[in-house]
Amino acid sequence: MDLYTISILLFIFFLILLSGFFSGSETALTAVSKLKIHQLEKKNNPKAKIVSFLKLQKEKLITTLLLGNNLVNTLATAIATSVIINYSNDNEKAILYSTCIMTALILVFGEVLPKTIAINKSEKISLMFSPIIKFLVKIFSPITFLIHHLTHAILKIFRFQSTSDIGTTEEELRGAIDLHAKGEGNIQEKDMLQGILDLDNLQVNEIMTHRKNLEVIYANEPIKKSMKKILDSQYTRLPLYDKNSDKILGIINVKDILKNINNKKKLDFKLLAKNPWFIPETTSVLDQLQEFKKKQRHLAFVVDEYGSLMGIITLEDIIEEIVGDIEDEHDITIKGAKKLKDGKYSIKGNVTIRDMNREFGWNLPDENASTLAGLIFHEIKAIPEPGKIFSFYGFRFEIISAKKNHIDLVNVTPLTN
């Protein structure tokens, strides 16, 4: 074998390495995490900025890499075929040998091997080769421009509309959070992160304390009775209510009561009360959190479209949607829900589905109803009588008591396969 042939073979080997470079770069830049690159950008990593730029120029990037890959593969195959023909008397066999040999070499060293390495080291490889790729994108830009317009013209003929990459979507974030929780086994982190994403999809009427469960102070009742209510309550802020006019007068803060309790003047709750703050029931929880911060308030009254009181929402209610229930010595874990010895759960109808799902690890849907009673009403489309049993979503629901067209108590049993 002469020096010329050795040089040709070395050149073919070099072209196969170039093929591996283009294939590996394409895989690495496609697979690299946008989130990791973004974090590196924030640390002023210059190569991370180049990678981010290339990912924004996705069509140009892919066209450049495919163009380079096909050029070197075609050139390598053509040269190899020419060499084999020179050493063979049968041209047809020479073409067959060349096809088989180059297919095997390109497949192993130009595709599978570099892509396998790139998929496992996508961040490192994309950062390493990004300056070279950026240079090639600029060099090949006239050709990629023509290919780009030709491709879009063909797609337009077939009425195919391409969509631009708008970055990481909420669904992708939720999927990443779910995968993280499965990998690390940290359910609390998953609940907190998904709780933040859920805030904008929740309305205040879904997490508020219903008006039937409110603890209130009446302006026209004896002071001693009101003070006993305040001392027995677990809350530091209580609505002040005028029983005669059926009107909310304000909010009583326990601190204000304590500051004035030793004054010689008689306590006047109306003077101590802060003005009530009314919000529509359709307000998103995220918007309400921002309003709480802006106005430095901790409690708001929720009203429907007719101005009727629906309930109250507090800053703690919103925080608990993110971090879970915040319990102190006065709190009861999911008030109105408890597990029985026989494996059943005794649950009040007004307990929220979100609270049950978090506490017991269930997956009951809360799109059409916010409470257990609402879920049963939605599914059976009727008001059930005590003793009736229904099964859906993998649970058995037995109505224990119902009062005035309202489900009061339900026994819930998870069904096992």
Image (cartoon, grey):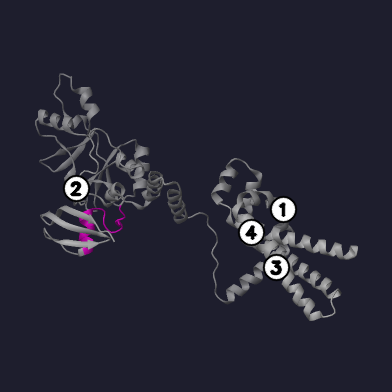
Disc 4 packing (10 Å; few <14; some 14–19; many ≥20): many
Along the polypeptide, which appears first: circle 3 or circle 4? Answer: 3
Query: How many numbered marks have been drawn onto this rendered protein structure?
Result: 4
Along the polypeptide, which appears first: circle 2 or circle 4? Answer: 4
Along the polypeptide, which appears first: circle 3 or circle 1? Answer: 3
Which is more toward the observer, 310 or 249? 310
Hey, what amino acid is under mark 3? Ala
Give the Cα distance between marks 2 and 1. Answer: 68 Å
- In this image, 221 relative to 68: left or right? left
Which is more toward the observer, 134 or 284? 134
- In this image, 189 relative to 148: left or right? left
Q: What are the residue bounds of the magenta stretch?
A: 362-379
Image: 77 above or below 120:
below
CB-based contact (under 8 Å), mark 3 and mark 4: no
Give the Cα distance between marks 1 and 4. Answer: 18 Å
Q: Position of residue 359 (x, y in %)?
A: 29, 46
Badge number at residue 104? 3
Q: Residue at x 72, y 62 (%)?
A: 19
Badge number at residue 341? 2
Hey, what amino acid is under mark 1? Ile
Q: Which quarter of the rendered picture does the C terminus lie within?
A: bottom left
Disc 3 packing (10 Å; few <14; some 14–19; many ≥20): few
CB-based contact (under 8 Å), mark 2 and mark 4: no
Q: Which of marks 3 and 1 is in front?
A: 3
**Secondary structure found at label 3:** helix
Badge number at residue 132? 1
